[in-house]
Image (tube, grey):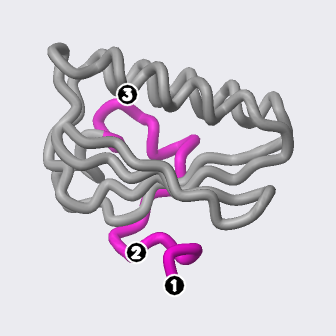
Amino acid sequence: MPLEFQEVNESTGIFRVGGDVQPENIEGYRKKLYELCERKNFTLQMDMTGVDHLSSWAIGVTALATQKIRQNGGDLKIYGAGENIKRILKFSRLDMIIQASSDPAPAAG
């Protein structure tokens, strides 16, 4: 699963997740996501275009990352979310703390 980060400016970046996040590839996802969440006053736009599944471990990692980035004065938002990702976020109740949209990441334009 390819992971790509694009810095838009000092306060905004796009984290592109290039496939489903499963137990066999969670470590790269976790490491990069947590690293990005260390930044102060940073908005991370996660591009989930093409992602159809998040494992339960990935859900936990994403929840902790959201908490971590908010403690540092920033925010994490999900863009390019398909119906299955939105359903996973709803069932895990992450939709209550993470904004998810099927629209492309606004900083990409």
Task: Determine if the magenta segment contains residue 107.
Answer: yes
Measuring 78% from the left and 57% from the top, which residue is drawn there?
A: 11
Image position of 33 (left or right of 44): left
Q: Nearer the viewer, residue 46 or 9?
A: 9
Question: Could you tell me which residue is drawn at 70 percent across and 59 percent down?
Answer: 12
Residue type of the residue flagged with mark 2: Pro
Q: Are marks 1 and 2 in contact (CB under 8 Å)?
A: yes
- Local SS, label 1: loop
Amino acid residing under circle 1: Gly
Q: How many numbered dots are placed on residues in this image?
A: 3
Of helix, strand and loop, which one carries label 3?
Answer: helix
Percent position of residue 95, x then y = 45, 46
Q: Distance between the Cα atoms at labels 3 and 2?
A: 20 Å
Circle 2 SS class: loop
User: What crowding class fits label 1: few (fewer than 14 Cα within 10 Å), some (14-19), or many (20 or more)?
Assistant: few
Q: Which comes before the other along the chain, label 3 or label 2?
A: 3
Q: Residue furthest bottom?
A: 109
Q: Is residue 23 above or below residue 70?
A: above
Q: Tag on residue 104?
A: 2
Residue 7, percent across and down?
62, 58
Q: Which amino acid type is marked by label 3?
A: Tyr
- The tag on residue 29 is 3
> Eyeballing the image, is 46 above or below 21?
below
Quadrant where the image shows the N terminus = top left
Q: Give the magenta range.
A: 89-109
Q: Earlier in the sequence, mark 1 or mark 3?
A: 3
